[in-house]
Image (spheres, rainbow, N blue to C red):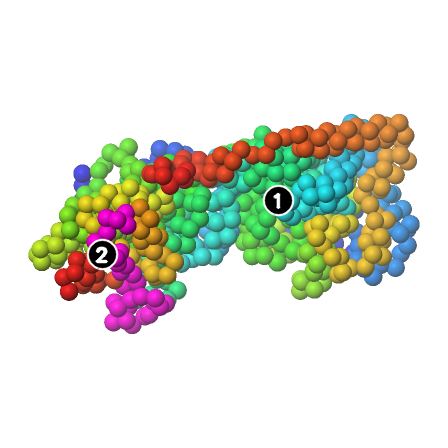
Amino acid sequence: MVRVNSRKQQTVAKSNYEIGKRAPEPSRVGAEETTATGVMDDESADMVDSSSPQQRRESLKEAQKNRLADIDRETLINIYHQMLLVRRFEEKSAEAYSAGKIGGFCHLYIGQEAVAIGAISAIRKDDYVLTSYREHAHAIAKGMSPDSVMAELFGKATGCSKGKGGSMHMFDKEVNFLGGHAIVGGQIPLATGVAFASKYKGTDQVTLCFFGEAAVNQGAFHESLNMAQLWKLPCIYICENNQYGMGTSLERAMASQDISQKACAYDIAAEFVDGMDVLAVREATLRAVERARTSYFPTLLEVRTYRFMGHSMSDPGNYRTRAEIERHQERDPIKLFTASLKEERVMSDSDFQRIEADVKEQVEHALEFAEQSPLPDPKELYTDVYANPIVPDSKRGPQ
Amino acid sequence: MTVVTMREALNQALREEMLRDENVFLMGEEVGAYQGAYKITKGLLDELGEKRVIDTPITELGFAGLGVGAAMVGLRPVIEFMTFNFSILATDQIINSAAKMLYMSGGQFNIPIVFRGPGGSAFQVSSQHSQALESWFSYFPGLKVVMPSTPADAKGLLKSAIRDDDPVIFIEQERMYGNKGEVPEDADFTIPLGVADIKREGTDATIVARSLMVPVALKAAEVLETQGVSCEVIDLRTIRPLDINTIIASVRKTNRVVVAEESHPFCGVGGEICQEITERAFDYLDAPVKRVSGADVPMPYAKNLEDLAIPNVDQVVAAVREIAYLE
């Protein structure tokens, strides 16, 4: 069974109780539910853990298997497919980056797949997603085609942002994927505004706002959570705590490292979620979505995860040990989910083989598409600066 | 036409545009219950309600970014900064989000938002509350920057800014809120962005001004008229995009230019205008282009020092006389 840190549980439960007192019934999150999320104990997640990798995997698997029963097979297969797709997509991106096909920065998501895919599996197509510059997975999970994402990485005209945004600025209006933002924490006020607009217009759309734990130190985080609870905005703040802001560990950057506890300062409901368990992330997000959709209540989810690759492709990796990375890789979210699906007989070996083959084809297709696509027309340099351009003087060039 | 203050003209523009389009909302510090720190939003909360007129916490980065996010999905926010000095806290969202969103999304997300409020000097409020920041915002492609100098311009330009599909920085001048002028009552009265206005025609020298310097330039032109110098006064109205055609046409006629501005000279709008003139009309110049700018110091508090830091009529008159070789 998953153990629960009693201090953390108390804190979160208190926050929920405060909220619950005022909120309409559907938005109430009880302490029992919080426990059921699969809250990791502190020790299982950080570096002083003394349990064996095998023990950790077993306990997680047990928790995940308990969740499988409530979800239909098609959804489970879809989730697995997406996790594998973004993993293979990013492995190919790394190769393409090393080969000089992708420029600039390239921040890989490998190890964190359960967060984006679990959370986005819990929302509707017309809901909104905003995230940081580590965004390829979120873009694909939200329904963007791997072709347009890869083409954007290649800086091609067929990219989702016409080659003007690159790895850090992917957008797709068709699927309400609102970017790719590359100033740490910058997307948090934006997402709050998107949620504000949903309430203003009276729709029941919700907004997922992803950010890393380093963004929690930014004023933008605190200003946004304050407004979201003050005005009851349907925004779900998902902190992907991968434990490092670039090369600086959480311990070296945050005075109080209990991120979910920070929600108490704004009277916002919060949950602490195991980010290696895709179904735990999905369940926690579903609860938050319900609260947001029916009662316009915001939620903060602290999702503990780990990035297996460097911060970017140019990371020297000298701030953590190989052993630490390997220990977390024992809890690889895809391995864990694969084991659960196998043991519960949701998918057969041939299902796994078929999906692996499908994914390979999708990624190869994306690479081929990106390779074959044309570069942006030089004329594109001056387009999209203004929606209503004012050109007082043609000699000045487009404005 | 009725005679109203610039404050009332701005209030009319906000009210008319909010009545016209329910996607327009107004957000900022003290814009609602307090009726606006400078009373620009007086009465709007009562008439339009809490949904449309929203008092914020003192959290400029947060509500500026919230506005940009709301604009991404179809609303048309008007974000008031109590003064533009406080917009400095929000520059990340104005510059990194609002100005660049359309471009970096490959044309998918335009940001129809207005950031407005008073800028420039006020009356003895010292260094942190007396800053002319137009050159900052004008630097960035993706932003439009507007600075009205009369009540009618304020109304017509603000209505255009709210209807515009791009982010507009709309800088009012705190000292000018009480200035009166004739303003059309027609709800469809607008003034296009990007078009300068010749506030006074002349033949001997051009004074290019904006905001607080427009009435200063007009007074200087009156003084110079008595000294036999006919000045043309151009009010830029929109700083970005700059209506360079109007300036160049005037330079070709008068062959002499003074740029008057309240802001600091270094890396300023005046320097940009001088360079444009040099590139486009060098052969028409009979004298070097002269700048009259605010003093290159933080704004002091003491009344006498503050007066010395802001360009006045005498300085503009002297500058024109210098380029007319009358000294």
Helix, strand or loop at mark 1: loop
Identity of the residue drawn at 83% across and 39% down: A337
Q: Do the residues labelled 2 and 1 touch (CB within 8 Å)?
A: no
Q: Which chain's residue wears label 1?
A: A
For the residue pair B55 and A181, the one nearer the viewer reads as: A181
> Residue A193 placed where, x, y %?
52, 43
- Picture disc at residue B150: none
Identity of the residue drawn at 31% across and 53% down: B274
> Residue A150 placed where, x, y %?
67, 36
- Picture disc at residue A168: 1
A390 up-or-down from B116: above or below = above
Q: Tell me if residue B275 is in the magenta stretch.
A: no
- Horizontally, is B258 left or right of A354 in the view? left
Residue behind mark 2? B287
Give the image quarter of residue B1.
top left
Same chain letter for marks 2 and 1: no
* Magenta segment: B281-310
Farthest-out residue, front: B283
Judge whether residue A297 can be spotted in this image: no
> Residue A224 placed where, x, y %?
55, 50
Identity of the residue drawn at 64% across and 32% down: A148
Q: Please, what is the three-letter code of the amino acid marked with disc 2? A: Ala
- Horizontally, is B61 left or right of B33 in the view? right
Give the image quarter of residue A169.
top right
